[in-house]
Image (spheres, rainbow, N blue to C red):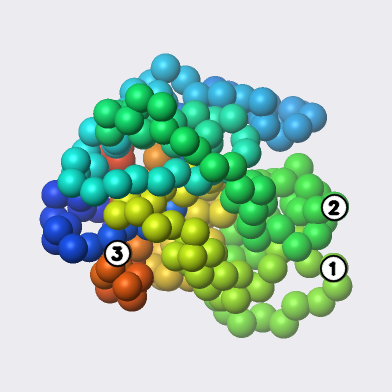
Amino acid sequence: MGFVSAKDFFASLASDERVFLLIRHAERGHITPDDPDLGAHVGLTDKGRMQALALGKSIPAEGDMCFYSSPVGRCMETARCIGEGHALTDALVEPLDCLGDFFVQNDEEAMKVMRNGFYEGLCAWLENEMAGKPRSGDEAFYPLSDRAEEMLSMMLEKGNARFNVFATHDAWVVPCLVHFCKMHFSPSCWMNYLTGMAVVTDAQKTVHRIVPVTAIDTGWLKF
């Protein structure tokens, strides 16, 4: 399954459908491997701001919006820029701590994974989870299936607008794409900025479909 253009996706929606959009932040500045806070202070580039503004413009005008975000600045900024692009001059973005580290079970072990090889560690966890391999010890991350379903439940419970935006990090969007859309990622083929999954429901929040979407030219980053 590949990524669908966000512009095409929003253009295809029926007037009575709701969207819960889980998306990675827009393009950020460079993060060095020895960064003491793993880039928590790194914000969006000018290009990233333009990407988020363009996404906001592609969302239909008919319907209200609400915004939730990882507390990290670049995610908050992404949500605000999406709102600005949608002609919301002062969009209220609610920070959610869980969107900062949703799949982390053990902070110390997760930090080791991030520092010893971010992509390699995440991919190894996801591959083991999809293969059903037994877990042991103090694992860095929660079991994939259970936690991804909790992410979806949280989004459906939180969002009460027609368009509900959840801005977070690739580390927590990729597991959801693996679980819900059966997508495959590797250290050499990762998810791009402003890319994620759109959950489409009816007015009662019954899920109709889950679509991988990207707001830029391609949803893939090749290394």
> How much space separates mark 2 and mark 3, taking CA atoms?
36 Å
Q: Which residue is mark 3?
A: 200
**Is 174 or 207 nearer to us in this picture?**
207
**Could you tell which of marks 1 and 3 lies nearer the N-terminus?**
1
Please say whether residue 178 is visible from this viewpoint: no
Please give the name of the residue rendered at 79% of the width and 30% of the height, measured from the top-left corner.
36
Name the residue type under label 3.
Val
For the residue labelled by badge 3, is the local secondary structure a helix, a strand or a loop?
strand
Question: Considering only vertical position in the picture, is 20 above or below 24?
Answer: below
Name the disc covering residue 13, or none: none
Location of residue 59 in the rendering, given as x and y in whole percent from the top left corner: 23, 42
Please give the name of the residue rendered at 28% of the width and 68% of the height, measured from the top-left corner.
203
Q: Nearer the viewer, mark 2 or mark 3?
A: 3
Say whether marks 1 and 3 touch (CB < 8 Å).
no
Please give the name of the residue rendered at 44% of the width and 44% of the height, measured from the top-left corner.
67
For the residue labelled by badge 2, is the local secondary structure a helix, a strand or a loop?
helix
Location of residue 191 in the rendering, given as x and y in whole percent from the top left corner: 44, 47
> How much space separates mark 1 and mark 3, taking CA atoms?
35 Å
**Is 89 or 166 nearer to us in this picture?**
89
Q: Which residue is mark 1?
A: 138
Please give the name of the residue rendered at 62% of the width and 35% of the height, measured from the top-left corner.
72
Say whether marks 2 and 1 touch (CB < 8 Å).
yes
Question: Considering only vertical position in the picture, is 174 above or below 59?
Answer: below
Q: Nearer the viewer, mark 1 or mark 3?
A: 3
Q: Which residue is mark 2?
A: 108
**Could you tell which of marks 2 and 3 lies nearer the N-terminus?**
2
**Of all residues shown, which one is farthest toward the top?**
46
**Is 154 or 40 nearer to us in this picture?**
154
**Quadrant containing the N terminus in the rendered view:** bottom left
